[in-house]
Image (cartoon, grey):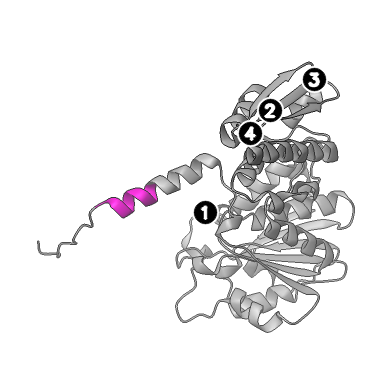
Amino acid sequence: MPESAEEIFYFDGSDALEAVFAGNIVANLSLIDRKLDVTSSSRDMCVKIISDNHEGFKKAVGLINELIVIYRAGGKMIPQQDFDHLLRAFCSHREKEVNGLFSERIKVGKRKPDIIPRTLHQLEYIRDIRSKDIVFGIGPAGTGKTYLAMAMAVSEFLSGKYSRIVLSRPAREAGENLGFLPGTLEDKILPYLRPLYDALYDMLDFDEVRSLMEKNIIEVAPLAFMRGRTLNHAFIILDEAQNASTDQMLMFLTRLGFDSCCVITGDPSQTDLMEKQQPGLLHARDVLKDIPEIAFCHFNSKDVVRHSLVEKIIEAYSLHKSTSPKKTRRGAGE
């Protein structure tokens, strides 16, 4: 039998120990034991890992070291979702991808946890936003395009780099536009802009958001309302840009003023434009790809960050669909 290896981790108090293991030491050590084939124990501010499985032991030690680095960088409790994400990465031989990844933090509201990238593409996206004037985030839903852009907007605003935040979306869904919706203008645009509000409330307290919006420091508006404006000293986000026409995209991009940053996000596979309309998002990518001050970050399905249970649900539905007998459609007269 191979000889057992042993490693002991020492923590400076119970707060540090709790924070590294996401506030649930027993359950999360049990997860490490089960997933990586090791045996762990916690006692007197120490965690001991022992195993005769060399690969599992190495991964468990690497995982805990990475968790400690993340905690020391931020000084806050590691969220359970981040713990789960790291554990999955080490279990699936992707530990090199996340090594040092979580040290790139986005600081938002005082009482809100830091936002951190969870994939290499997300890290590249954040770095581009910090260094470029215009950044396109292109890829499927759930990859963090809008959320990270919003986090960067809030962070840069709070640091004093920009004096306001402007958020916009094309008011177009499934062939409809604002004129088809009942109510006041505010009532009409709210369904389109709700995802932006949701992200804001994740990063700032409710009263802060309300105060900043009342002062028009944070402005949320449909894309059609951007015409004729010049936005100086602003962090500007255009979300759902796959629903912008080429003319709208050109109009939006030329709103950029002095000392401003612009982030455009969209998923080309989810456009609601008419078939004859050319998508402004893909057209802009082709036209602007050689301008060095503009960055294009492309996300894929591997960048989708979901609750682990959601992944299991999707897999279960996919399996059920593939094994279920196909139904034959009946004619209208049958």
Q: Amino acid at mark 4?
A: Pro
Q: Position of residue 34 (x, y in %)?
A: 56, 31
Q: CA distance from mark 3 to mark 2?
A: 17 Å
Q: CA distance from mark 4 to mark 1?
A: 72 Å
> What residue lies at 65% left-to-right and 75% top-to-bottom?
249
Q: Position of residue 4 (x, y in %)?
A: 67, 30
Lower sequence index among marks 4 and 3: 4
- Left or right for 128, reference 22: right
Q: Nearer the viewer, mark 2 or mark 4?
A: 4
Q: Quadrant of the N terminus?
A: top right
Say whether marks 4 and 1 touch (CB < 8 Å): no
Say whether marks 2 and 4 touch (CB < 8 Å): no
How crowded pointer 3 is (Cα within 10 Å; few <14, some 14-19, many 20+) is rated as some
- Name the element at disc 3: loop
Q: Main secondary structure of the magenta part?
A: helix
Q: Quadrant of the C terminus?
A: bottom left
Residue tagged 4: 2
Residue tagged 3: 45
Residue tagged 2: 50
Q: CA distance from mark 1 to mark 3?
A: 60 Å
Question: Is residue 185 shown to the viewer in this render?
Answer: no
Say whether marks 3 and 2 touch (CB < 8 Å): no
Q: Amino acid at mark 2?
A: Ile
Residue tagged 1: 183
Span shown in magenta: 317-324
